[in-house]
Image: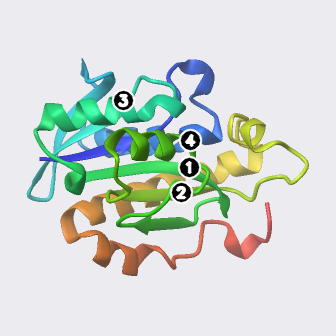
Amino acid sequence: MKILVGLGNPGEDYMTTRHNIGTRVAEEILQRRGQPYEERKARSIVGRVRIGDHAVIVARPQTFMNRSGRAVADLLKLAETGPEDLLVVCDDLYLDLGRMRLRTRGSHGGHNGLLSIIETLETQAFARLRVGVGPADPEVPHADFVLAPFTRREQSLLPDVVRRAADCAEAAIVLGVAAAMNRFNRTPPPGAAEGPL
C-alpha cells in the first residue's frame, strides 16, 4: 500500500492559497479516477485508488500545516506501512511556479509541514514532491506569501501546473522516484517562455 499526501491547510478559506497546492494535486489524482474524497480517517480526508499496479491511499490532512506529522503518522498506521511507501506533495516558495523538485529524502528546507512530518516520524527518509509557487516577493514575509491567493496570471497557469505535478506524482509511484526525477525535475514550468510572472 502506497500513501500520497497532499499538504495544505483545512477549510475553504485556505483552498485558493499557494500553501495548498499539494491538496490540489491530490484532488486532481482522485478526480482523474472519478473518485472523490469519501472517508474521514487518520485526521485526514482520504480516497483509495489504483495507480498502475499499486493500491494507493490519497490523503488530504485535516490538521493545520505545522501539525501535518500527526496526520501522516496516523496514515502510516492505517496503511500498516512505513515512510518508504510515503510520497508527500507540498508547495515550495523558492521554486518558480510550476517547477518541480522530486527527492527520495532531505531536510524540511523551511517548510513547516515537512518539518512536522520529519519530527514526528523521526526520519527524513521519505519521498517528497515540491511544487514551485514562487518566486516569492522579497518585500512580503514568507508566511504571508504562501497564505495569499495566486495572482490572476498565476491562476491562468495553475491547471497545467497541477496536472503536471499529478503526472509526476503518479510516475513516482508507478516508475519509481529515480525515474520520475529524471523525467520531471528539469522540465521547464508552464509559461516559462512568457517571461517572469
Q: Residue at x 43, y 73 (%)?
A: 184
Query: Which circle marks residue 131 in the picture?
Result: 2
> In this figure, which residue is indicated by the disc labeled 3?
70
Q: Where, by quadrant of the figure, is residue 47 drawn? A: top left
From the viewer's perspective, is the residue at label 1 or at label 4 nearer? 4
Q: Position of residue 79 (x, y in %)?
A: 13, 37
Question: Upstream in the sequence, badge 1 or badge 2?
Answer: 1
From the viewer's perspective, is the residue at label 2 or at label 3 nearer? 3
Residue at mark 2 to residue at mark 3: CA–CA distance: 22 Å
- Say which amino acid is labelled 3: Arg
Question: Upstream in the sequence, badge 4 or badge 2?
Answer: 4
Query: Which circle marks residue 112 in the picture?
Result: 4
> In this figure, which residue is indicated by the disc labeled 1?
91
- Say which amino acid is labelled 1: Asp
Q: Nearer the viewer, residue 125 or 179?
A: 125
Q: Classify 10 Å Cα crowding around label 3: few (below 14), some (14-19), many (20 and above).
A: some
